[in-house]
């Protein structure tokens, strides 16, 4: 049986955010009790850069930022086929991943 995630796989991470003006991709928007800010969810489209020895995943964003996250985190899921097809430009390119690996730019501390 194939592992749930492999190097290079596109993944979607659902992050909670807070701001005064939610963006167009915001969903599940709720105003704060005082009414000055909003809490909402945003899907982030990342790729698996590597699977670390402790089982955690090193994920890369389109701009090269890296995040470490557990594979069983409920906010993380594999990208669906239609997301890969319709939203493919939101995922980091495989070329970016190979450049990050070649340069040896790997995080030591988690960001997520």
Image: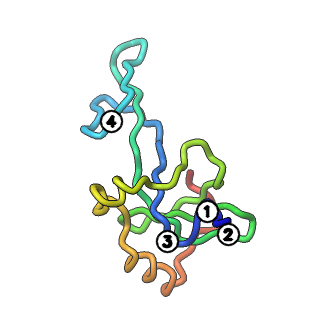
Q: Which residue is mark 4?
A: 26
Q: Earlier in the sequence, mark 2 or mark 1?
A: 2
Asked whether disc 4 touches disc 2, contact meaning CB atoms under 8 Å apart, the reply is: no
Q: Earlier in the sequence, mark 3 or mark 4?
A: 3
- Compute the Cα span from label 4 to label 2: 31 Å
- Compute the Cα span from label 1 to label 4: 25 Å
Q: Which residue is mark 1?
A: 57
State the image coordinates of residue 32 (x, y, percent, origin top left): 41, 18
Q: Earlier in the sequence, mark 3 or mark 2?
A: 3
Asked whether disc 3 touches disc 4, contact meaning CB atoms under 8 Å apart, the reply is: no
State the image coordinates of residue 107 (x, y, percent, origin top left): 58, 69
- Compute the Cα span from label 3 to label 4: 26 Å
Q: Residue at x 64, y 55 (%)?
A: 71
- Compute the Cα span from label 2 to label 1: 6 Å
Find numbered disc 4 in the image and state the secondary structure of the residue it sits on. loop
Asked whether disc 1 touches disc 3, contact meaning CB atoms under 8 Å apart, the reply is: no
Indicate the quadrant containing the N terminus: top left, top right, bottom left or bottom right. bottom right
Find numbered disc 1 in the image and state the secondary structure of the residue it sits on. strand
Give the quadrant of residue 22.
top left
Q: Which residue is mark 3?
A: 8
Q: Residue at x 42, y 53 (%)?
A: 80
Question: Label 1 crowding class (10 Å Cα cut-off): few <14, some 14-19, many 20+?
Answer: many
Q: Which residue is mark 2?
A: 52
45 with respect to 71 (left or right):
left
Front disc: 3 or 4:
3
- Compute the Cα span from label 3 to label 2: 13 Å
State the image coordinates of residue 55 (x, y, percent, origin top left): 71, 63
Asked whether disc 2 touches disc 1, contact meaning CB atoms under 8 Å apart, the reply is: yes
């Amino acid at each position: 049986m194939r592992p749930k995630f492999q190097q290079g796989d596109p993944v979607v991470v659902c992050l909670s955010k807070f701001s005064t003006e939610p963006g167009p991709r915001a969903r599940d928007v709720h105003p704060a009790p005082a009414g000055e800010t909003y809490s909402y969810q945003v899907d982030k489209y990342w790729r698996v850069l590597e699977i670390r020895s402790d089982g955690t995943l090193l994920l890369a964003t389109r701009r090269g930022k890296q995040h470490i996250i557990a594979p069983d985190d409920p906010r993380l899921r594999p990208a669906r086929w239609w997301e890969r097809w319709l939203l493919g430009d939101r995922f980091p390119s495989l070329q970016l991943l190979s450049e990050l690996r070649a340069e040896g730019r790997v995080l030591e501390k988690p960001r997520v």
